[in-house]
Image: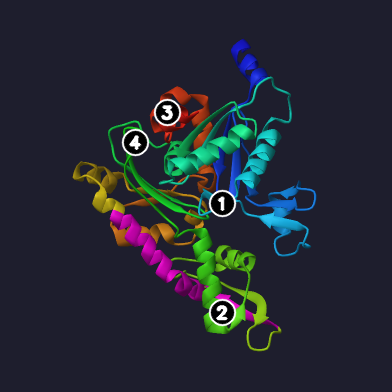
Amino acid sequence: MTKFFTQSFFSNDIGIDLGTTNTLVYVRGKGVIRNEPTVVAVNVKTNQLVAVGHEAKKMLGKTPPHIRTVQPLSHGVISDFEITQELLEYVIHKAQEERTRMFGPRVVIGVPTGVTNVESRAVRDAAVAAGAREVHIVEEPIAGAVGSKLPIHEAFGTMVLDIGGGTCDIAVLSLNGSVASKSSHIAGDRFNENIIDYIRSEFRLLVGERTAEEIKIGVGSALPLPEPLERAVRGRDLATGLPREIIITDTHVRESLSVSLDGLLDALKEVIEQTPPELLSDILERGVVVFGGGALLRGLPELLEKMLGVPVRISPDPLTAVARGTGIITETPELFKEIFLHEEEILSQT
């Protein structure tokens, strides 16, 4: 108890799933305490933070010229370093606000597969500038596998699919490492774009990203459903410029997503082709575990299982799998030091 009290007083371990669409924060001993959109609103006149997360997302497309709403990550990569630093400073401060601590926290951050040394260094520098004492970077598929309690330490093949907002990461894991992997931009944001383009083409109606997201969640599916779904959608008529309402069904959404879902299947097959034969038998037995927000698309597991010929299951609480994984890693980082991304390169430059 004394050791735990001392560690709690001096610092607080934090796991962060730094996603393109949402940022989740895990605090040791408490679990996931925050899940907010990765959006920041800044006053360009005073250079001060106006809002973060849900409050900032409400301002998208509705702000006066002196307030700028920014999504600082694009396809899982930092596109605005200063705003990302502000975001990390905000979430780290919120995670520690209940008690003043002498030192900054140890932070583990999940990033997409395939980020470069420069990109991972940018994430680390942003966290250090935001007050972190110690920062470790880990690939999101590995963090999600840890959060899903998969046996990545063992000499068995474990295949995971992480469908986030900006990126989709596929990996075959064994002995604390990634044997084969691929990162793709076919993810939640791409699905939204597909829906917007389809409605514009088929109905001559212009809708925004938020409406597309609501359509995807409300009536989206990868396979035909026992009971059809539909919802009313309002937008601007491209012919008259006036507001108009249409009815969108799950069939429409399925048609709009067909090309992207085909691309996702191709990416999965590509990773399977790169996997050594010895590990393929494990995948055939254990199947593929899916997490991330895209895992909630109706019928997706059944579609993947049908096309790949292997079992496919959704991780428990797929939205928080990566955040839970980063949190577990903060508790015993020495057990996961082999999976930290570009650790040697980063430390050599420090």
Distance Cα–Cα, label 4 vs label 3: 10 Å
State the mark number for residue 200: 2
Secondary structure at badge 4 equals strand
Residue 314 vs residue 229: left or right? left
Secondary structure at badge 2 equals helix
Which amino acid, mark 2? Arg
How packed mark 3 is, by other alpha carbons closer than 10 Å (few <14, some 14-19, many 20 or more), is: some
Applied colour scheme? rainbow
Q: Which residue, given by chain and number where applicable, does mark 4 sit on?
A: 177
Q: Residue at x 59, y 12 (%)?
A: 3
Question: Could one spot residue 223 in this view of the protein?
Answer: no
Query: Residue 289 location, x and y as percent?
Result: 39, 47
- Up-down relation of residue 334 to residue 48 (above or below): above
Which residue is at the front of the view, 246 or 306? 246
Decide which of tag 3 and tag 2 comes sooner along the chain.
2
Which amino acid, mark 4? Gly
Magenta stretch encompasses residue 268: yes
How packed mark 2 is, by other alpha carbons closer than 10 Å (few <14, some 14-19, many 20 or more), is: some
Q: Which residues are magenta?
A: 243-270
Residue 100 vs residue 304: left or right? right
Secondary structure at badge 3 equals helix
Secondary structure at badge 1 equals loop
How packed mark 4 is, by other alpha carbons closer than 10 Å (few <14, some 14-19, many 20 or more), is: some
Overall secondary structure of the magenta section? helix
Query: Residue 192 location, x and y as percent?
Result: 54, 66
Decide which of tag 1 and tag 2 comes sooner along the chain.
1
Question: Could one spot residue 195 in this view of the protein?
Answer: yes
Magenta stretch encompasses residue 217: no
Distance Cα–Cα, label 3 vs label 1: 28 Å
Which of pointers 3 and 1 indicates the residue nearer the eye?
1
